[in-house]
Image (cartoon, rainbow, N blue to C red):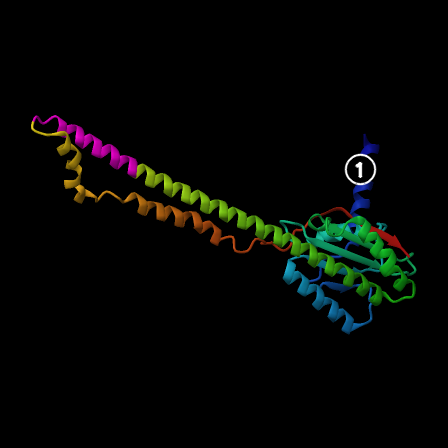
């Protein structure tokens, strides 16, 4: 029993050491966080920050690039996954975040690239795409020591894909909202028609009942019974129900005003699972 407790304690210590290697998110961090100091191009960093910030404002998707000196025994993909969960990259509702980790070649081992894709972006950025991006667009630059060039090449490929995926999703959402509104309008007209029909039926039944009372008079002729409702036409004061239908139609349309923006995201709290890739160089 004691031996098992010792093993559990060692395992927990190992996990805590690994978790400690994942850095905390800097306060007011920009999309590009060069902790390893390997980009060495301030103008490029500013351009990438502006590009990713614009993407975030347009689509609410968050892409973060982080360079580190050490992966703490993890592979690049796992490190990126833990960092994404710890920092809460992406929106809480759709987990639409993406993390790019770059560890350079140094005295701690070979260089490595790690991608982690939030659940909401796994369709737009599948694992095959991530691996091809690392091998074909980043590694050639990194082998020459050009980390800035490799990171920029990858971002230039990722951003259009995310924009295209967002555009398609937005179009589908708007189309769905449009069909809901059309269906809602049809229901309103059915309600109005039903109310009008009920009012008409009520009037017909009322006239027939009045005619039946007239027949009971011994001096009344059939023609007098038929013509009697005409003399009582000024009593058309009982028509409040159609007005209520207008109110109901307005109430049916009110919820659509609250859905002007089909996408509402809460930043922070995005979750990462198994999506992504790792490549050593």
Residue that label 1 marks? 8
Q: Magenta residues?
A: 200-218
Residue at image position (88%, 59%) is: 139
| Res. 273 image quadrant | top right
| Res. 163 image quadrant | bottom right
Q: Is residue 222 above or below residue 256?
A: above
Name the one closer to the observer, 157 or 84: 157
Name the one closer to the observer, 67 or 262: 262
Residue 176's x, y, as percent?
A: 57, 48
User: Quick one: label 1, few (<14), some, or many (20+) residues within 10 Å?
Assistant: few
Residue 94's x, y, as percent?
A: 65, 49
Task: In the displayed orientation, state which residue is furthest to the left.
Answer: 219
Give the tally of numbered discs: 1
Task: In the displayed orientation, state which residue is furthest to the bottom.
Answer: 43
Residue 72 seen = no
Residue 191's x, y, as percent?
A: 39, 41
Residue at image position (8%, 26%) is: 218
Give yes or no for residue 210 being in the magenta stretch. yes
Name the one closer to the observer, 246 or 66: 246
Quadrant that contains the N terminus? top right
């Amino acid at each position: 029993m004691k031996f098992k407790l010792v093993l559990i304690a060692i395992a927990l210590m190992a996990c805590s050491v690994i978790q400690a290697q994942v850095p905390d998110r800097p306060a007011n961090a920009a999309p590009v966080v060069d902790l390893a100091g390997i980009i060495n191009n301030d103008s490029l960093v500013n351009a990438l920050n502006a590009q990713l910030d614009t993407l975030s404002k347009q689509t609410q998707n968050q892409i973060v690039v982080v360079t580190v000196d050490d992966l703490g025994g993890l592979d690049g993909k796992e490190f990126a996954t833990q960092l994404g969960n710890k920092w809460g990259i992406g929106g809480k509702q759709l987990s639409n975040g993406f993390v790019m980790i770059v560890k350079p070649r140094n005295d701690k081992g070979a260089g490595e690239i790690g991608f982690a894709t939030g659940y909401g972006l796994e369709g737009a950025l599948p694992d095959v795409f991530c691996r091809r991006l690392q091998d074909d667009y980043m590694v050639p630059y990194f082998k020459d020591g050009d980390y800035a060039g490799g990171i920029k090449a990858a971002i230039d490929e990722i951003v259009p894909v995310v924009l295209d995926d967002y555009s398609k999703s937005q179009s589908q959402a708007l189309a769905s909202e449009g069909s809901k509104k059309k269906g809602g309008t049809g229901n309103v007209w059915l309600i109005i028609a039903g109310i009008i029909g009920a009012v008409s039926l009520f009037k017909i039944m009322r006239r027939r009942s009045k005619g039946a009372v007239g027949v009971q008079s011994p001096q009344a002729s059939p023609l007098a019974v038929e013509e009697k409702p005409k003399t009582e036409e000024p009593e058309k004061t009982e028509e409040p129900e159609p007005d209520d239908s207008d109110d109901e139609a307005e109430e049916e349309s009110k919820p659509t005003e609250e859905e002007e923006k089909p996408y509402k995201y809460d930043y922070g709290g995005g979750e990462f699972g198994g999506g992504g890739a790792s490549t050593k160089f």
